[in-house]
Image: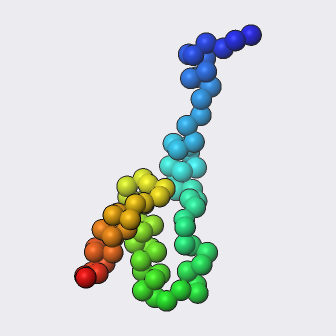
Amino acid sequence: MQQTLEQKLTNYVDRRTSEEVRSGGTERRQFVDSRRALRPEVVELAEAVDQYKLRHRRRFITFEELYDVMVGLGYQK
């Protein structure tokens, strides 16, 4: 038996809006496990990147976005 497009769409589960994520469930972060061994300034950058990713709903960021985060922390060249 072949499902119609409408039936397939009603069976679709969008995990990005699941109850777990909306209710403050855990989310994987890039640097969380390794922060204990890092210098304080590196931890600050890692947390700023994580906050940027959360605010902008991004899983990965570009080098330009990373630079913007660094400028936001006060980096100057």
Q: Which residue is drawn at 28% across and 75% down?
A: 71
Q: In which quarter of the image is residue 5?
A: top right
Image colouring: rainbow
Q: Residue at x 25, y 82 (%)?
A: 77
* Relative depth, front residue between 69 and 32: 69
Expressed as whole percent of the image width and height from the top left, the position of residue 26 reads 58, 59
Which residue in the rendered view is the most extreme toward the bottom? 39
Left or right: 71 with respect to 16? left
Left or right: 1 with respect to 74? right
Q: Residue at x 40, y 72 (%)?
A: 48
Expressed as whole percent of the image width and height from the top left, the position of residue 69 reads 33, 70
Q: On screen, 74 above or below 31?
A: below
- Give the total of numbered labels: 0
Expressed as whole percent of the image width and height from the top left, the position of residue 61 reads 42, 60
Which residue in the rendered view is the most extreme toward the top? 1
Q: On screen, 37 above or below 54?
A: below
Q: On screen, 24 above or below 74?
A: above
- Please state, as top left, top right, bottom left or bottom right, where the N terminus lies in the image: top right
Q: Residue at x 46, y 83 (%)?
A: 42
